């Protein structure tokens, strides 16, 4: 999950009684953050007045494999290997497709040129929006250009948070 806190984006852990915000960027920290070798973290109460948004986000795009029984909508994770050199990694988890790299039993993957993709979108599931705790999660869908999509996925990668 993610949090916008004091206008900065953080990964969070929901510890039920409080949140733990996590970053790898020293510039997003203050004197209250503790550190490990690679990250900084801070516990904050759930009613902290600086919490702006708490959400999860999923990224999707459309690419047609031209194969029967293969969906054309693909989820792209905010992990470093999913976008590289103007290519996007697609993972198929319901079997092995011809010409795709086998990762494990019934899972294969393939990099495709992002210019061959379309219908880019992000789906946000918010539990806090604009500082207000929501009684039920709000789902927001945002259509994106190819460039906006790449930027948003990269922004949510752990190395950039």
Image (cartoon, rainbow, N blue to C red):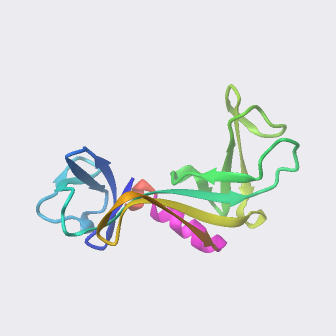
Q: Position of residue 129 (x, y in %)?
A: 36, 68
Q: Quadrant of the C terminus?
A: bottom left
Side of 107 where 5 appears, left or right: left
Q: Which one is nearer the viewer's eye here, 52 or 88?
A: 52
Side of 24 where 108 appears, left or right: right
Q: Which one is nearer the viewer's eye here, 34 or 12?
A: 12
Counting labels gives 0
Asked where in the image residue 104 lies, by quadrant, the reply is top right
Vertical placement of 69 versus 3: above or below?
above
Side of 115 where 25 appears, left or right: left
Q: Which residues are magenta?
A: 145-156
Q: Any magenta on residue 95?
A: no
Residue at x 78% of width, y 63% of height: 116
Side of 27 where 70 appears, left or right: right
Name the main secondary structure of what is drawn in magenta: helix
Taking the view exactly as shown, the residue that stands out farthest to the left is: 31
Taking the view exactly as shown, the residue that stands out farthest to the front is: 135
Q: Which one is nearer the viewer's eye here, 117 or 110?
A: 117
Taking the view exactly as shown, the residue that stands out farthest to the top is: 105
Vertical placement of 10 versus 77: above or below?
below
Q: Position of residue 59 (x, y in %)?
A: 58, 58
Residue at x 62% of width, y 73% of height: 147
Q: Position of residue 140 (x, y in %)?
A: 52, 65
Q: Any magenta on residue 147?
A: yes
Residue at x 66% of width, y 51% of height: 89
Residue at x 19% of width, y 51% of height: 35
Asked where in the image residue 112 lies, by quadrant, the reply is bottom right
Q: Position of residue 80 (x, y in %)?
A: 52, 53
């Amino acid at each position: 999950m993610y949090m916008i806190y004091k206008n900065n984006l953080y990964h969070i852990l929901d510890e039920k009684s409080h949140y733990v915000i996590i970053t790898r960027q020293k510039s997003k920290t203050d004197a209250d953050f503790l550190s490990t070798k690679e990250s900084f973290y801070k516990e904050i109460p759930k009613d902290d007045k600086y919490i702006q948004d708490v959400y999860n986000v999923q990224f999707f795009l459309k690419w047609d494999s031209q194969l029967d029984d293969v969906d054309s909508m693909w989820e792209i994770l905010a992990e470093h290997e999913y976008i590289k050199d103007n290519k996007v990694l697609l993972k198929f988890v319901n079997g092995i497709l011809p010409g795709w790299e086998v990762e494990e039993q019934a899972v294969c993957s393939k990099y495709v040129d992002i210019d061959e993709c379309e219908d880019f979108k992000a789906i946000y599931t918010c539990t806090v929006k604009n500082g207000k705790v929501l009684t039920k999660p709000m789902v927001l869908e945002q259509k994106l250009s190819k460039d906006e999509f790449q930027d948003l996925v990269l922004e949510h990668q752990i190395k950039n948070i």
